[in-house]
């Protein structure tokens, strides 16, 4: 195949990928968009095999077949609730593959491109670094999401210093790679140092990020995996790899921006470990880690709201069925309790009673961008009823009742006026403006930010149903019949 | 291809990609992300070229390394691609299913 034809096809495939993404902007066309991207990628593989004349290398097909089996099994078996950790894990694999390509390219195995040795050396080292940071960061993130690793930020001694030193070493080694030339000693040195330090850095930066900052971290890792691919593409002179890697990098960057804006956090703060949970008492902090597997202690049994009971005698179920309009606010707690199906049943039941039901989705509710939307879609909630924060926030004033399920920081009114708290300035859902608020949360502990929610102590119009969201919702459902 | 050309292509696709992705609503952010995630498996191209070229041309340790490192990379990237597109498809189907039900 001539190079010109190859370049033209690569450009066409890049455009096809972009087309696929633009199809992803609407629910109706999104399935097609995903298929277009997948087919483009498949064609990319075919064209690469043809262009490099390696169709006869049968081991390639064996390796791809193994990957196909594993990937297929993962994709078909995974539960929606496990989606965040699967996305993180797959992302890590992409980074890993890019790092491997970087290693091979640096060692001059496979694609030997000696026209621009400096460029190849630098990009190979960078591919190893970014790829391995992606891999280790993603593995740590997946471990946290899968609850193998602690949810709270883990801080080592001299954490910031260690990470800064690692970064300096990585920058140094990249610089060195430009002058290292091509001899086995310098290559070995580059390999060992870049692999070791970037592995350490990947773990170090991800382990310091806690639960609610996960959406940002995952978006960022997503971006990095694309960048790693693009850099690896530069190292091995693969046009398609560079262009598609760039697209993925841009998408991750955009999502990261969206998430940061929604949390009113700066990316730098999250990366440098300025997490909102600055432990005041480091020892006691470990004990208060919210672990849903631990049995609730006595303060988490259902608290009758005595103050409200005098003037507002109706029970939460009566409030809901008597309301004209209800907004349901889901949070990570709904995901944890896997209560999305009960939420959907409750919503349906209310609609049968003539109540207008809407869902308000905060951009960072959950553990990855759009997490709540996916769970509610799984539970057959029509997406027309899901409203973004900006679209629904002014409607809380005129809403009779709000049902909060496992959300905390995203409804905390303290974000508006408590200037000294970490969540100050973060846009929140105006739940407190509704006439009645029913909160189905696991307990009254502050959310991830560690800021007390004044809604919990506000008696008038606030009803707390504490404990497992599934049980609270079941009792609500029974009350609605 | 000249390094500058590659860098330019990288910059250009990043900008165009950014502009297009901006149109995706938050509702679809998870499928978007997992779709992008699948696309990041494009690095399989580099890996399979390495495997193929070493298989056909290299000998001894280089052949072995090419097959092992490259092979692992091909497997990982393929899992990334197939798993990523698979779950994205499943998620999008869920969204789409809802649309039909509400209309009926």
Image: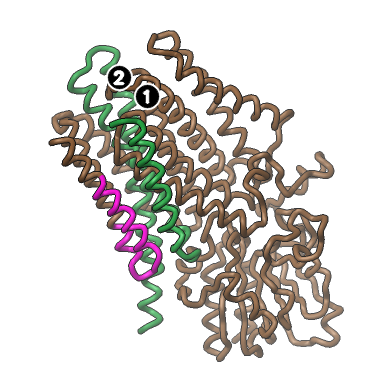
Q: In the image, is residue A30 part of the stretch drawn in magenta?
A: yes
Residue A310: percent from left, percent from top: 86, 85
Q: Residues in magenta?
A: A11-35
Q: Which mark is residue A120?
A: 1
Q: Which mark is residue A114?
A: 2
The chain holding disc 2 is: A
Indicate the secondary structure of the residue bearing disc 1.
helix
In front of the other: A22 or A452:
A22
- Please name the colour scheme applied to the rendered image: by chain
The residue positioned 16% from the left and 41% from the top of the image is A5
Image vertical order of residue A365 relative to residue A463, above or below: above
Residue A30: image quadrant is bottom left
Residue B16: percent from left, percent from top: 39, 53
Visible residue check, residue A338: yes
Alpha-carbon neighbours of circle 1 within 10 Å: few (<14), some, or many (≥20)? many
In the figure, the shade used to draw chain B is green
Visible residue check, residue A191: no
Distance from disc 2 to disc 1, alpha carbons, whole Å, reads: 8 Å
């Amino acid at each position: 195949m001539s190079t010109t034809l190859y370049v033209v096809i690569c450009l066409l495939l890049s455009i096809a990928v972009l087309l696929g993404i633009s199809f992803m902007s609407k629910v109706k066309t999104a399935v097609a968009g995903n298929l277009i991207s997948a087919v483009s990628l498949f064609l990319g593989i075919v064209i690469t095999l043809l262009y490099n004349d390696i169709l006869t290398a049968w081991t390639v097909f064996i390796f791809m077949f193994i990957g196909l089996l594993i990937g297929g099994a993962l994709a078909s078996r995974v539960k929606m609730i496990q989606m965040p950790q699967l996305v993180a894990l797959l992302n890590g694999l992409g980074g890993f593959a890019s790092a491997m390509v970087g290693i091979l390219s640096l060692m001059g195995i496979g694609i030997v491109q000696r026209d621009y040795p400096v460029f190849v050396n630098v990009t190979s080292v960078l591919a190893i670094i970014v790829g391995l940071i992606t891999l280790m960061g993603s593995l740590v993130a997946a471990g946290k999401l899968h609850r193998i690793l602690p949810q709270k930020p883990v801080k080592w001694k001299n954490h910031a210093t260690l990470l800064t030193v690692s970064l300096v070493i990585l920058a140094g080694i990249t610089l060195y790679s430009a002058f290292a030339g091509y001899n086995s000693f310098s290559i070995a040195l580059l390999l060992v140092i870049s692999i070791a330090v970037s592995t350490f850095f990947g773990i170090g930066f991800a382990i310091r990020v806690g639960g609610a900052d996960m959406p940002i971290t995952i978006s960022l890792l997503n971006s990095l995996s694309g960048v790693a691919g693009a850099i690896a593409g530069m190292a091995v002179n693969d046009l398609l790899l560079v262009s598609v890697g760039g697209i993925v990098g841009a998408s991750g960057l955009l999502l990261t921006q969206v998430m940061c804006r929604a949390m009113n956090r700066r990316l730098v703060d999250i990366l440098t470990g300025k997490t909102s949970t600055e432990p005041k008492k480091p020892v006691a902090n470990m004990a208060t880690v919210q672990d849903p597997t631990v049995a609730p202690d006595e303060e988490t049994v259902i608290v009758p709201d005595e103050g409200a009971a005098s003037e507002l005698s109706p029970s939460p179920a009566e409030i809901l069925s008597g309301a004209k309009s209800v907004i349901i606010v889901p949070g990570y707690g709904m995901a944890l309790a896997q209560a999305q199906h009960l939420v959907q049943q409750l919503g349906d039941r209310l609609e049968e009673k003539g109540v207008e039901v809407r869902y308000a989705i905060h951009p960072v509710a959950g553990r990855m961008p759009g997490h709540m939307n996916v769970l509610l879609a799984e539970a057959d909630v029509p997406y027309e009823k899901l409203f973004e924060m900006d679209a629904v926030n002014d409607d809380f004033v005129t809403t009779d009742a709000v049902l909060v399920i496992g959300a905390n920081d995203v409804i905390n009114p303290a974000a508006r006026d408590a200037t000294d708290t970490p969540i100050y300035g973060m846009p929140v859902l105006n739940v407190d403006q509704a006439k009645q608020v029913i909160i189905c949360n696991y307990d009254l502990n502050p959310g991830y930010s560690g800021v007390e929610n004044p809604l919990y102590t506000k008696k008038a119009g606030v009803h707390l149903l504490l404990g497992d969201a599934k049980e609270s919702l079941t009792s609500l459902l029974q009350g609605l019949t | 291809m000249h390094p500058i050309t590659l860098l330019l292509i990288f910059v250009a696709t990043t900008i165009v990609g950014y502009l297009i992705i901006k149109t995706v609503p938050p509702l679809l952010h998870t499928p978007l992300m997992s779709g992008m995630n699948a696309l990041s498996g494009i690095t399989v191209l580099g890996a399979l070229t390495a495997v193929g070229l070493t298989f056909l041309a290299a000998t001894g340790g280089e052949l072995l390394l090419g097959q092992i490192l490259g092979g692992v990379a091909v497997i990982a990237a393929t899992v990334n691609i197939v798993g990523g597109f698979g779950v994205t498809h499943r998620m999008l189907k869920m969204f789409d299913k809802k649309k039909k039900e509400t209309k009926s």
